[in-house]
Image (spheres, grey):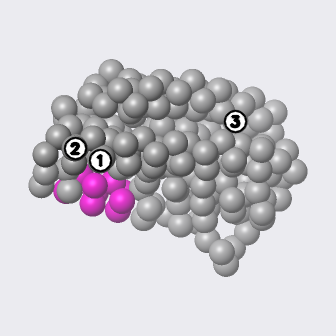
């Protein structure tokens, strides 16, 4: 449990304190479309990587199902972003950021219920961060194409968070019933 809490604290710090995240979601500054695209690509790759782990390692059947859905959904969205970025001449990162890679590596080292808890938490934080960045871009983006893509994609990301909350609540209820 302590290991999960430490991991959860790191995930929160690593994913919400990066300069790119702060710039992309700041209320005081306009959103740089290229920066948003880079943040979205990093987050999208991260989502696929951890969802692949979830599909393989989750013990909760609902988390496994959610993970498979995330792999499909985020692979599709990542492809759309790559197409848009290529047309606009925006270079996207080819690998995830150091903070995301650290989270992936730590998740890979967990198993059982400890994995399920940490994985669900990482997914929740990742989706909350994505919602913030996509909302900011859809409201203040300068490029009409990227702004429209962010607005079109945002409802699906919000829905993923709702699905995860529902799955997590079912998991928590199941744990309490076992006691």
Q: For residue 29, say whether it is visible.
A: yes
Q: Nearer the viewer, mark 2 or mark 1?
A: 2
Check disc 1 and report the residue beneath it. 172
What SS does tag 2 mark? Answer: helix
Q: Nearer the viewer, mark 3 or mark 1?
A: 1
Mark identifier at residue 177: 2
The furthest residue to the right:
144
Query: Which mark sits nearer the N-terminus, 3 or 1?
Result: 3
> CB under 8 Å between callouts 3 and 1?
no
Secondary structure that dominates the magenta span: helix
What SS does tag 1 mark? Answer: helix
Q: Please state the extent of the stretch shown in magenta in the rendering.
A: 6-14
**Residue 46 on image: x %, y %:** 46, 38
Of residues 36 and 113, the one nearer the viewer is 113
Residue at screen point 13% across, 45% down: 179
Q: Within the magenta stretch, is there residue 10?
A: yes
Query: Which mark sits nearer the N-terminus, 2 or 1?
Result: 1
Task: Give the CA distance from mark 2 to mark 1.
Answer: 9 Å
Query: Which mark sits nearer the N-terminus, 3 or 2?
Result: 3
Residue at screen point 52% across, 42% down: 163
Mark identifier at residue 81: 3
**Residue 98 on image: x %, y %:** 37, 46
**Residue 92 on image: x %, y %:** 62, 38
Q: Within the magenta stretch, is there residue 3?
A: no
């Amino acid at each position: 449990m302590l290991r999960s809490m430490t991991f959860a604290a790191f995930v929160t710090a690593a994913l919400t304190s990066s300069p790119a995240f702060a710039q992309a979601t700041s209320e005081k500054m306009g959103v740089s479309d290229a920066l948003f695209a880079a943040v979205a690509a990093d987050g999208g790759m991260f989502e696929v990587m951890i969802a692949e782990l979830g599909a393989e390692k989750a013990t909760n059947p609902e988390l496994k199902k959610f993970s498979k859905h995330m792999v499909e959904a985020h692979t599709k969205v990542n492809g759309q972003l790559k197409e848009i970025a290529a047309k606009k001449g925006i270079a996207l990162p080819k690998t995830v950021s150091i903070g995301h890679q650290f989270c992936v590596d730590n998740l890979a080292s967990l198993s059982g219920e400890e994995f399920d808890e940490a994985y669900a938490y990482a997914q929740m934080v990742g989706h909350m961060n994505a919602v913030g960045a996509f909302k900011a871009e859809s409201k203040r983006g300068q490029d009409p194409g990227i702004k429209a893509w962010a607005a079109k994609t945002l409802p699906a990301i919000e829905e993923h968070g709702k699905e995860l909350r529902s799955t997590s609540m079912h998991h928590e209820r199941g744990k309490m019933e076992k006691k």
